[in-house]
Amino acid sequence: MAAIDNYIEERLDDQRSWYAQKAAFNKSRYRTFQIIAIIATAIIPVINLTSGWSLDSVTQRAALLASSIISAGVAIIIAISQMEKYFETWLLYRTTAEALKRERFLFQNSCAQYSNLSEPDKNRLLVERVEAMTSSENSKFFAFQQQTRVMQQQQSPTQPKQGTTTTEQPK
């Protein structure tokens, strides 16, 4: 197998697959959290309204407790979603996966920058462009993480500085 075939299989395809999987994970997490927050937020007024119909103070207190717990849950879900940057990471990873896929097709079909190049030049250009894409994506990822840490420190300046978030770093 030629060196470029190995590179395509072991690096380009592997990276594209990794980014596609992580994009799907972040999309799923973002959408799940958003749906939960929307439904829970919509339930709160219903609980509050129906508790007013009851003359029983125990029922009213239970409804107040339930709406308070749901409100706290919504606040936690939104905070986690913002902290982990599921939406931004989803878009970033999906964009990178699609760019890698496009680059492979352009290379294989000798289109765009790959037209009228010798095989060694085409191979070198592919490697340079793929590595530039993954390097650029890594820089964006770290910029997002730094922005998250700064926001967390601004929101709770009395707490000691913590390590990085749990969002997974690109390979």
Image (cartoon, rainbow, N blue to C red):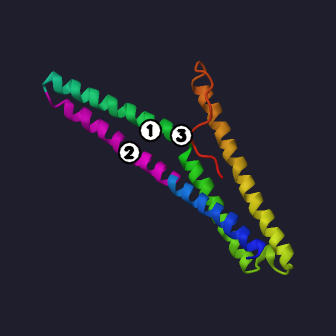
Q: Which of marks 2 and 3 is nearer the N terminus?
A: 2
- What residue is disc 3 on? 82
Figure check: 59 above or below 23: above
Mark 2 surroundings: few (<14), some (14-19) or many (≥20) residues within 10 A = some
Query: Which residue is at the front of the view, 38 or 26?
Result: 26
Work out whether residue 118 or residue 33 is closer to the camera in this orientation and state it: 118
User: Which stretch did the figure color magenta?
Assistant: 26-54
Tell me where residue 154 appears, x and y as whole percent: 62, 26
Dot placed on the residue nearer the N-terminal end, 2 or 1: 2
Q: On the picture, is 45 further left or further right than 56? A: right
- Residue 67: where, in percent of width, then height? 30, 31
- The residue that label 2 is drawn on is 36
Contact, CB < 8 Å: mark 2 with mark 1? yes
Look at the numbered disc 2 and give the secondary structure of its residue.
helix
Compared to residue 59, the image places residue 147 above or below, namely: below
- Cα separation, mark 2 vs mark 3, equals 15 Å
Q: Indicate the quadrant containing the N terminus: top left, top right, bottom left or bottom right.
A: bottom right
Identify which amino acid the numbered label 2 is placed on: Ile
Report the front residue among 169 and 110: 169
